[in-house]
Amino acid sequence: MRVTVIGCSGSFPGPESPASGYLVEAEGFSLLLDIGNGTVGSLQRFHDVLDIDAICITHLHPDHCLDLTVYWIARVYCPFGRAPQIPVYGPNGTAEHMAKAYELEPNPDMGVAFDFRTFPPDPFRLGPFRITTALMNHPVEAYGLRIEHGGRVLAYSGDTGESDALVELARGADLFLCEAAFVEGRENPPDMHLTGRTAGEHAARAGAGHLVLTHLLPWNDPAVTLAEAKMSGFTGTIELAQVGTVYDL
């Protein structure tokens, strides 16, 4: 698997990154994990914007899904001809939510470009990938994802507060993209996001190999988030997500 960071800013785009988006490739198949605001622009720096085979949306907050509306334009109105319909997996109501965001009808309007599917309860195949989902600890229906291919494992937290389910989802992951939106010492709302420290603790419990801290809020100092993670007890590699970074698993 090859993983490219397309966007890693939390809650809203920052000066150096759009919101959440990650490109996962294997065997010629291209999968987007989240498509938050600004990610379609960033994607064009690294990949053919129409050469996407599927999308998984972890939850329906704008920083994880809103650019699906402009991606619909790209796929439907491309002057070289309409791009093929692709599957879009997400929580319950994804089709209706996204159509409403762009003042369309789910079908046939948005359905011309996207075949909306609700995440199944059991692991499923998507192209060459085996994908397992788990509900995360967030104010809306939100999922973490475990993506397996060729004996390698990518885990992606999406958005979550502290969660035993996340530990199991990331068990033995080669690469763990874990949100760290909050910093220690503030009155952080419960059951919403992790800090660098708690992200590191989850990675340690899961036995992950490589932790990449993401969903970094623009008003936080990323060096503080990284320092917190390094004090968590996790002994593997830790780094901050950056747009354009590529991980070959």
Image (cartoon, grey):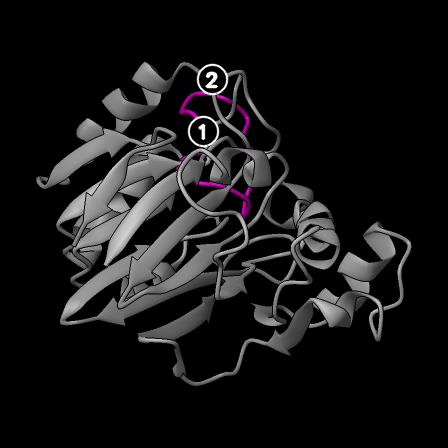
Q: Hey, which quadrant is residue 188 in on the image? A: top right
The x and y percentages for residue 237 are 12, 37
The image shows residue 90, relative to residue 62, as above or below, that is below
- Residue at 52 percent across and 63 percent down: it is 56
> How far separated are the C-alphas under marks 2 and 1?
7 Å
Judge the density around disc 1: few (<14), some (14-19), many (≥20) Cα neighbours within 10 Å: many
The image shows residue 32, relative to residue 86, as above or below, that is above
Q: Taking 106 as reference, is 172 left or right?
A: left
Please tell me the numbered disc located at residue 220.
2
Q: Pointers 2 and 1 in contact (CB under 8 A)?
A: yes
- The disc labelled 1 sits on which kind of residue? Leu
The image shows residue 31, relative to residue 19, as above or below, that is below
Magenta residues (range): 180-194
Figure quadrant of the N terminus: bottom left
- Residue at 59 percent across and 43 percent down: it is 36
Judge the density around disc 2: few (<14), some (14-19), many (≥20) Cα neighbours within 10 Å: few
The secondary structure making up most of the magenta span is loop
Q: Magenta stretch containing residue 189, yes or no?
A: yes
- Along the line of sight, the residue nearer the viewer: 24 or 151: 24
- Residue at 42 percent across and 44 percent down: it is 47
Q: Hey, which quadrant is residue 170 in on the image? A: bottom left
Label 1 sits on a secondary structure element that is loop
Label 2 sits on a secondary structure element that is loop
Q: Taking 207 as reference, is 140 left or right?
A: right
Number of numbered discs visible in the structure rendering: 2
Q: Taking 1 as reference, is 121 left or right?
A: right
- The disc labelled 2 sits on which kind of residue? Asn
- Residue at 69 percent across and 66 percent down: it is 113
- Asked if residue 221 shows in the view, the reply is yes
Q: Which residue is mark 1?
A: 216
The x and y percentages for residue 175 are 22, 51
Pick out the residue farthest to the left: 235
